[in-house]
Structure formats: C-alpha cells, structure tokens
C-alpha cells in the first residue's frame, strides 16, 4: 500500500514509564519507513486539545533510546475526560488530516483512546506503565526497569537494616496494583509482601511474625509494601511501638519511574512500536498491542479493556510459600 502523505499522530500519556522513548522512536522511524508523515502531540491528550503538534523526522528521535521519561512529555487531562473534549480532539486531528492516532500509555490512556475512537479516530494503543496493571497483556513498557530499580534499592536498604538490626518497611509504587511489590519482594527475599489485590495486610499478624522471627535469631525484617496498602511511616511506628524493634520506613517513590530502560524495555517497546505501524499499514482499526503467552499481537481495543488484571496466582503462591 502507498502511505505517502498519510498523516498519523503519536502521543505519550499518563504516568511516564522507561521505554516510552524507545516505543516513540520505533513508531516514528518505522512509520516514516512505511511512508507515513508522523506528527507527535505534546503532553498527551492535552497536546491534542491545544493543537500542539510537531512533525517528526527520523533525527527527531535520535539518541533517546537509553533515556527514561518521554521526550514529548506526558500529562493527565481533565478536559479530555469529557465528551466535548473528545469531540474537540477528534476535530483538531481531522483539521490536520490525521485519522490515525498511536497512544503510548496505561489503563487510563487506553480508556481515553477508546472514547476517542467513538468519534471516528482510529486508535492504536501501546501498553506503557510501570504498574503492569493491564489485563490484556503480560508485559507493559516500563515495568521491567521499575522493578529492577526497586529491587536494587531494596537490596541496599537490606544492608543497612541488617547492620542496625532493624525492621524496614519499604514502599514501592502501585496504588491499585501489587506487581512491583510482588516481583521485588520475591527477588529480594522480603519477609512480607503486602499487595492491594489480595488485601493481605494485617498489622497484628505482621507484628506476631516479626516477634517470632526475632526469637529465632533473625536480625532484620523486610516488609515490601505496595503504595495502595497504607501509610508506611504509620505502619513503621506501629510496628516499633508493638515490638520494641527499631523500624524505619523508606518510600521509593518516583525514582521507580525514571532511569535508563533495561534491555527488555528497550527491545519490547521497539517491537511494539513497529507492530503498531504494521496495524496501520494493514488498515486495522482500534487495536491494542499486547504481549501474551510469549507473543506480540494486536487485539481489539474494546476487548483489551474488558480484561481485568488479577494478581498472577502462581507467582503469588510461590511468593507466599518461600517468603519465611
Ligand atoms: O501508574 C504509575 C504510577 O506510578 C502508580 O504506581 C502511582 O500510583 C501513580 O502512577 C502516581 O501518579 P502521579 O504521577 O499522578 O503521582
């Protein structure tokens, strides 16, 4: 098919994730290679509403592969949440002769993209979130980097915690999703992994276990706590008051969202970007690019949104069996 002069747009939206730049680079370069003119919208859906676009050439995405964040910025837009905002965004895209939009983002961005598709824009979504909380895919851009960053930080806290014979509550990101906590908890040999999906936090039980473990001669106790569970400083002071063991909270926070993407995030994001362009070449409509059962594929966007993310049963079972 000759795509010469067919305009397409790309944006990044929601919480940034390492590897977004790699996905953008693949979209731009393979899009141009396929004959499209590629326009980047700045600051996610805000860029659509503000008509803030720039045409990219292949040099526009040079030297970004190893950079965390997103060079075209990201935002969360309230105006775009409304039907009027979505209509306005579709009108602005059409005024630029753009009928196809590639969205790199998480759950909220997929939902926004689906709403926009109801106004006739063809939307292709790439999953990018450190939370890994999209039911349609086993992989999201950024999770691998964030989990590695958190793992290294927890290892470091363990060193000092053990030297001081303390208990440590380490809070990782994931307001509604415990994937970072589950993976890093297993990877660092944490004594507790608290995640929102299973609602498995009970302060009294944790305190009892800490006391038992101290009696057995263990000189440290690492609790990996998902952001959604509760206030880590409060949990730490309650543990200290009940056990008499010095307890500190460490909140890893936004450091998990930054940093140079891992090889997995660079490569998978690049492949996903290319698959998105293939969808446009094949005139596919409203697709989500996913990685499931070891394969990259595109699925219907509305179908992608129907799949709820649950905690992986096997991983959770293994974690709970080997934790103490
Ligand atoms: O979606 C990724 C994420 O980092 C969550 O883990 C976290 O709860 C949220 O974003 C924080 O978002 P904000 O950038 O709005 O503080």
Image: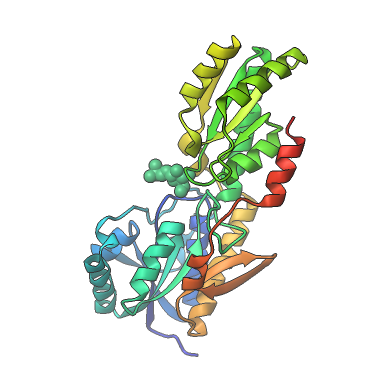
Residue 20 makes an appearance in the image: yes
Identity of the residue drawn at 68% across and 18% down: 220
Which quadrant of the picture is home to ligand 1? top left
Residue 136: image x %, image y %? 56, 64
Residue 87: image x %, image y %? 25, 72
| In the image, farthest residue toward the bottom | 1
Which one is in front, 196 or 182?
Answer: 196
Q: How many marks?
A: 0
Identity of the residue drawn at 31% across and 77% down: 119
Residue 140: image x %, image y %? 56, 57
- Among the 4 quarters of the image, the one containing residue 4: bottom left
Q: Does residue 135 sit above or below 281 in this rendering?
A: above
Which one is in front, 258 or 294?
Answer: 294
Identity of the residue drawn at 32% across and 61% down: 45
In the displayed structure, does residue 21 sit left or right of residue 100?
Answer: right
Q: Does residue 208 sit above or below 129 in this rendering?
A: above
In the displayed structure, does residue 16 sit left or right of residue 319?
Answer: left
Q: Quadrant of the C terminus?
A: top right
């Amino acid at each position: 098919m000759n795509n010469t002069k067919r305009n397409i747009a790309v944006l990044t939206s929601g919480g940034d994730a390492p590897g977004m730049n790699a996905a953008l680079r693949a979209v731009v370069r393979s899009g141009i290679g396929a004959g499209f003119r590629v326009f980047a919208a700045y600051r996610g859906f805000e860029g659509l509403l503000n008509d803030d676009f720039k045409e990219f050439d292949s040099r526009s995405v040079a030297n970004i592969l190893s950079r965390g964040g997103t060079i075209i910025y990201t935002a969360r837009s309230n105006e775009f949440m409304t039907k009027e905002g979505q209509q306005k965004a579709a009108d602005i895209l059409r005024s630029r002769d753009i009928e196809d939009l590639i969205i790199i983002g998480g759950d909220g961005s997929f939902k926004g993209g689906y709403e926009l598709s109801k106004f006739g824009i063809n939307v292709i979504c790439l999953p990018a979130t450190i939370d890994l909380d999209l039911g349609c895919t086993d992989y999201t851009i950024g999770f691998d980097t964030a989990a590695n960053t958190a793992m290294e930080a927890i290892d470091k806290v363990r060193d000092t915690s053990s030297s001081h014979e303390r208990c440590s509550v380490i809070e990782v990101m994931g307001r509604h999703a415990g994937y970072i906590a589950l993976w890093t908890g297993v990877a660092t040999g944490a004594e507790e992994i608290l995640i929102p999906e299973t609602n498995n936090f009970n302060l009294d039980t944790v305190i009892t276990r800490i006391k038992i473990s101290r009696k057995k001669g263990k000189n440290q106790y690492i609790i990996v706590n998902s952001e959604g569970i509760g206030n880590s400083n409060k949990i730490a002071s309650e543990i200290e008051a009940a056990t008499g063991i010095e307890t500190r909270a460490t909140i890893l926070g936004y450091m998990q969202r930054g940093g140079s993407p891992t090889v997995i995030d660079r490569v998978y994001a690049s492949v996903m970007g290319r698959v998105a362009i293939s969808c446009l070449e094949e005139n596919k409509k409203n697709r989500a690019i996913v990685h499931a059962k070891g394969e990259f594929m595109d699925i219907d966007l509305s179908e992608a949104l129907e799949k709820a993310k649950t905690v992986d049963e096997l991983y959770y079972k293994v974690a709970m069996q080997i934790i103490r």
